[in-house]
Image (cartoon, helix red, strand yellow):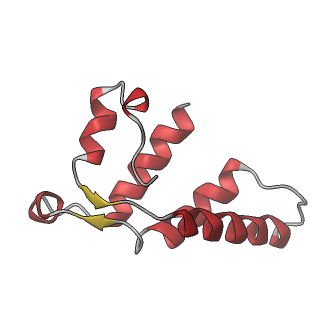
Amino acid sequence: ATRPPDAFREKKSDTEIYAYIRLGASPRATESLLAISKTHAFCHAREFVTFEDVNQCAPHVLKHRILLNNHAITKQISAEMVVDEILKMVKAY
């Protein structure tokens, strides 16, 4: 479950970012992201999580859990850049 089904890859720009990923984040990464997002919301005196909480926490949780392929490395694309692009794609939906 680390790669999205083809139905979600409708736009050309969406598929370009996945061309750089060798291994995606595991289900444990999702659990960690949820936990840290809840903590972030709590620290900001809220009892609910917003997209901004997830947006702030995702780079810290996901950047070391995504393994890039050699193509990304030769193009000097970092895991942080990949996470940022994925967050932009999710926010668009």
Q: Nearer the viewer, residue 65 or 72?
A: 65
Position of 59 compared to 76: left or right?
A: right
Q: Position of residue 33 (x, y in %)?
A: 62, 65
Taking the spot 51% from the left edge, 72% from the top edge, the residue there is 60
18 shown above or below 21: above
Taking the spot 54% from the left edge, 63% from the top edge, the residue there is 27
Position of 31 compared to 1: left or right?
A: right
Taking the spot 25% from the left edge, 64% from the top edge, the residue there is 68
How many tags in the picture? 0
Q: Position of residue 39 (x, y in %)?
A: 77, 72
The furthest residue to the left? 74
Q: Quadrant of residue 58?
A: bottom right
Name the quadrant of the C terminus: top right
Position of 60 compared to 34: left or right?
A: left
Q: Position of residue 36 (x, y in %)?
A: 68, 71
Q: Position of residue 6 (x, y in %)?
A: 36, 31
